[in-house]
Amino acid sequence: MNTFGHFFRITTWGESHGAGIGVVIDGCPPGLPLDPGDIQAELDLRRPGQSELTSPRQESDRVEILSGVFEGHTLGTPISLVVFNRDMRPYDYSALKDVFRPGHADFTWQGKYGRRDYRGGGRSSGRETTARVAAGAVARKILAGKGIRVLAFARMIGGQWLQDAAVEKLFEAGAAGLDAVASATGLDRLRQAIYASQVRCPDTEAAQRMAAAIRGAAAEKDSVGGIVEVRAFGMPTGLGDPVFAKLDALIAQGLLSLGAVKAIEFGDGFRLAEMRGSQANDPFLRRSDGGVMPGSNRAGGVAGGISTGLPLVCRVAVKPTASIGRPQATVDAGGQARELTIEGRHDPCIVIRLVPVVEHMVNLVLVDLLLSQMVTRAAAGGTK
Amino acid sequence: MNTFGHFFRITTWGESHGAGIGVVIDGCPPGLPLDPGDIQAELDLRRPGQSELTSPRQESDRVEILSGVFEGHTLGTPISLVVFNRDMRPYDYSALKDVFRPGHADFTWQGKYGRRDYRGGGRSSGRETTARVAAGAVARKILAGKGIRVLAFARMIGGQWLQDAAVEKLFEAGAAGLDAVASATGLDRLRQAIYASQVRCPDTEAAQRMAAAIRGAAAEKDSVGGIVEVRAFGMPTGLGDPVFAKLDALIAQGLLSLGAVKAIEFGDGFRLAEMRGSQANDPFLRRSDGGVMPGSNRAGGVAGGISTGLPLVCRVAVKPTASIGRPQATVDAGGQARELTIEGRHDPCIVIRLVPVVEHMVNLVLVDLLLSQMVTRAAAGGTK
Amino acid sequence: MNTFGHFFRITTWGESHGAGIGVVIDGCPPGLPLDPGDIQAELDLRRPGQSELTSPRQESDRVEILSGVFEGHTLGTPISLVVFNRDMRPYDYSALKDVFRPGHADFTWQGKYGRRDYRGGGRSSGRETTARVAAGAVARKILAGKGIRVLAFARMIGGQWLQDAAVEKLFEAGAAGLDAVASATGLDRLRQAIYASQVRCPDTEAAQRMAAAIRGAAAEKDSVGGIVEVRAFGMPTGLGDPVFAKLDALIAQGLLSLGAVKAIEFGDGFRLAEMRGSQANDPFLRRSDGGVMPGSNRAGGVAGGISTGLPLVCRVAVKPTASIGRPQATVDAGGQARELTIEGRHDPCIVIRLVPVVEHMVNLVLVDLLLSQMVTRAAAGGTK
Amino acid sequence: MNTFGHFFRITTWGESHGAGIGVVIDGCPPGLPLDPGDIQAELDLRRPGQSELTSPRQESDRVEILSGVFEGHTLGTPISLVVFNRDMRPYDYSALKDVFRPGHADFTWQGKYGRRDYRGGGRSSGRETTARVAAGAVARKILAGKGIRVLAFARMIGGQWLQDAAVEKLFEAGAAGLDAVASATGLDRLRQAIYASQVRCPDTEAAQRMAAAIRGAAAEKDSVGGIVEVRAFGMPTGLGDPVFAKLDALIAQGLLSLGAVKAIEFGDGFRLAEMRGSQANDPFLRRSDGGVMPGSNRAGGVAGGISTGLPLVCRVAVKPTASIGRPQATVDAGGQARELTIEGRHDPCIVIRLVPVVEHMVNLVLVDLLLSQMVTRAAAGGTK
């Protein structure tokens, strides 16, 4: 199943070492200004080769819009986006044909389909996420028009944390308190700081510790994992379609569908499990404009699967890169023991490149639920 | 969106204080022996009033099969299951009409739809899960025919853990090592032990600590949360449809669509984020029958979103029950401050009753992916 | 697949001789006033036993709303509707267990599923359409709020036609010219005339000829078929989602999913195939308010799968009732020749009872596309 | 909604004068041998410029497979197919920017989306069907592996019919009687004869009459319509998923989603509406191998929405080409009267090029239902 979304449906295709990677977006409203540069800018954020901490591979990743856009605006028809794989070096992949790389999906893929594109991870490669970022860039434009902004950043890498206090400082200084409409300017500045950082962490001190952890692992031909945190500001109340398309349920589906993500939590997450109800419940307050809002955000911006209007807060655990330079024991398809040393230009920490992917996957969920909410509201208005 | 699944599609309906709760299953294969007792037995596991640790409400919850079954077998047509709400006490709910209960979805529901059934949680009530258990009971029968068994249990309640060592002992003694086909008898015995426990934890010592934690909170008119762990045995390789219907992605969607669940992790989960690749990768071994299998299960039975054949292992964080007896500060729909004391017969720890719900939600995902895998296999066989 | 619709999704269930027939509507907007009487009134229109021309069976068909409605308004949650089969006479169906009735789906059903509810047609019975009418009644209320009205009527029965000139007279006198907004009052009066007619034809002279044709066939223990025409007035432009959810494509799917319907045509239909382009093209005119409209309606209100704003016009061919009283040659499941005489209370002309079903199936398509169009418009407004 | 199918899902994209036309197939089984030539051969059948009776446009229409195929076999991953629009002549389309061409979808498209690609029909162009043919070519290979063959041909053009007797002669001589497994060789030969004919009619005499009718209209700068008949041989029993994914319902949706198709009938279609039940019912017979089959095929191979095993028979009415060379009265977007003369290289009879499109649309429906039936059968086998 390579389609995600009910109203803003994306269908992705492409193997890592095939002709290209692409996505068809069905359900994008007509009249949205869109040009390739909007999408290219986001793709550039997940490109490798941007610092010594990521793979030195040079992937130009030029997006082309093949349909759905005319005279600079969307038509309401399917938008077909493609990134051709232009930088494939000639390489002999036959060594990987019959061996299962530990931590990769070669084994399960072979078991499921009986054949696979052994020249790389195929569809299970991180390269598949290129298509999600491309589609997410379109979603992001729609959300921006509604004042919704999503930010992801490295919260932990290789055991080095950006502490709670530092996080709160970032968002108070740069952006949004509970009762404030997030400052668009502050959030834009914070996003720039995130992507100016080699490790996608806007706090310099934490970023240095994280970078050192990556260098330490890389020096030992090993890799590290980490935690990506994502927050959405300017959230309206009402996003999320109970019971199976709840806001948190769809985000969980979307983010767990990333190969390296092994866990997710919303708000205080696992810590909530150890609290008592009197601690965990967010009380309600009167908002300064007379409305109602939760007075704390332990729930992470979602209650009963529907957005509360407070910022969405969510964290995902990213396992360390499976491809490591040190020898590993494995077996081949025939069950024979093999020692495998993975050559090549791999990322010692995939967290860095997952940050924009996580952000755009959340954009895709939010735009889907936003369109859904529009029809609920429009229809309710007409039927009352 | 009240439908879940692509091949074994369930559509649930019903408000907690309405006429009833039900589900329509579309896509159940014909010829499955099924009678109401199969479903009733599973519903009985989530019924309140089974010990002093759950709500004393008496809900008889009798399931009726309205369609899709004839002469004791499924027809291949939609199976309509209903549990009528027969035990509604007359009660004046007008006090809850305009007030938002902290930790509940009253506020977001009102914001989204502009109206709600204020006599209880409506669709956001835990009672909605009755329908999932009923459908899950049908899924469970199909899975059993394929040798797949899902077990859920309380892993932590109120800060009291069933420790790693104790878990491994349970499954080694009772059931399945890595290389063994799980003993069906052992797993059935273990399941009985789980449901014989007041707290759904089969280890007596841990269960006593958990029970004490619940009693402590209840005595203070408060509530506790916890962690439910779920494992699936007898898993074939190949379940999971990349890229958006991955095994872990769909389980995450399914379990996060439960109102009280705030986090999920697979295998070593968040701990993987702090490991190095050389630690986190599961190496491959030659199986005793000559095949291949992972030699450890840090991934929790899933790689690249497809089952590896090792047991599926997953944990969810359950927040403490939102309804507590002690007074809470809140506001009403008009923004006026109110002190709210929730009367009634609430569970001091919802973990107990979520255990069978989590199990059946996983059953529903597994059966959907099993049917999907059948068509892949059948079609591949015919086209090679 | 027992679900229809993308935005206003209905899932139907039930066998003709099972416990009941029902439908779950997911996606109905909140705030719509709805009570059982709204639905009952429409169900009553397809009930048998209303004249000597339909089956004398007495089916009370009382609808119950089990969820999704509170204090007289829809909640935005799934609406579960059920009609219990209360009037089942005890009857020995074993004679039908192994024999395939000509013209019925017993044979194909048995072949597909390997078993069937042989006490009647099961899901292939016309009784299944009860659920569609119930859901259509809800759709009709939403459409009425937008000024859209759908009317179906018998155009031909047993070879007796309501001629073109008579049709045009009906709609000019009672309702809508090309450039006029259809008169709601006129259309309501016309609908009453349709259902006041035994044969669902509002022209007295034609109705008499049709009734005579039915009586003639019934006297010979035979049956007749016919043609149902359906028109929708007050159509906005823009309903229909290219390329696969075109207005005419979805109506064709919906109406061909009725067991007795074997053909469909829009506008001039098959006659268009014999025209030249210069005759078939509808020219465009300036509307009196300055806008644009087609100057003729050979296309039947749809161009490129999108509504033009002119009335939708469509006709379906209904085969004669398969159950006839005269002996028929057939074979049993074992291939043995059998002479079959179908006992019981069957309709000599199913057209009469299909008229409201056709109308409501079109209502269901229109409301689905109307909700879709709302999200397109709302989103386009927000993104320009 | 640009996706069709539930198991073999196609998502099409592309405007007639954009960068290209494409399709993503999701759900194609792994292991199917596939190379671009398989698809190219089918695309070549709908190409213009093949005789003086079609548009002299030269469209090379080279298909490229961008994903889902590796080492000559499908992988089970999405298959992305694209045909780039390489032959666009520079042309000034501004004359068409504000005018609505009679019989085209310019008006409705503009009304729905507020903007359109005015350089041609955009998504409403017949060129969109290129994507369906490309996907249908893959479906055809799967069906061929199961012995199912679909044939379409011109049944009527410009009032010139291929008579019933001639049709029966073709299929008796070339292919399949009721009780015979269709001869694959005979059907392949018949298909060659169809595409060897300028008008896609394998009967020489009728083809000459049809060609003359086209020439007559073309000489007067006008166009003709016609009827395409499609038959499927080697049908198993059991294809079709009641109640909304019935075989005939899905074919109706698929074929009515072609812009020029205005009507469809199965088997005896509209003629059934004038028959009595005793004439219309297909009796059942004992098959020579001891099984059961219908003894006639008035139903067109489908009963209750499920295939009977007899050949599927269906006809669609195709309206005459909307683009004609003679001047037509119309209005522009501002409502001003305009006389429009459509220049360019248009087909005087679109039936010719629709023949392969109709065939492949039916292939797409059949393969979807075939995969569905596989899961029903596989699952039923496992649960009995």
Image (spheres, coloured by chain):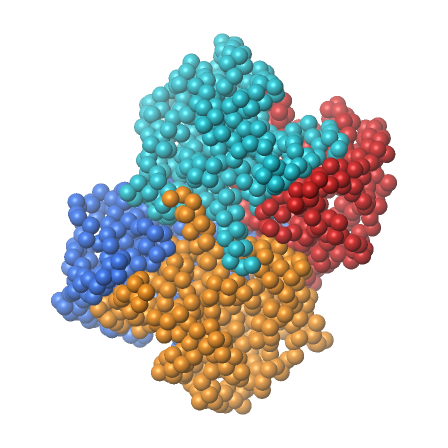
Chain colours: A red, B cyan, C blue, D orange
Residue D359 image offset from top left, x and y in percent: 49, 70
Residue that appears at 60% across and 75% down: D44
On-image quarter of the N terminus of chain D: bottom right
Left-right relation of C265 to C167:
right
Could you say which quadrant of the image residue A187 lies in?
A: top right
Residue A147 image offset from top left, x and y in percent: 67, 42
Q: Looking at the image, is C216 positioned above or below residue C126?
A: below
Asked whether residue C378 appears in the rendered view, the answer is yes
Left-right relation of D111 to D305:
right
Residue that appears at 37% across and 71% down: D180
On-image quarter of the C terminus of chain D: top left
Residue ranking furthest to the left? C219
Residue that appears at 22% across and 42% down: C86
Asked whether residue A284 appears in the rendered view, the answer is no
Residue D342 image offset from top left, x and y in percent: 59, 80
Q: How many marks?
A: 0
Could you say which quadrant of the image residue D172 lies in?
A: bottom left
Work out whether residue B216 or residue D179 is closer to the camera in this orientation and state it: D179
Residue A148 image offset from top left, x and y in percent: 66, 41
Residue that appears at 40% across and 70% down: D181
Work out whether residue A303 or residue C108 is closer to the camera in this orientation and state it: C108
Could you say which quadrant of the image residue B93 lies in?
A: top left
Left-right relation of A165 to D117:
right
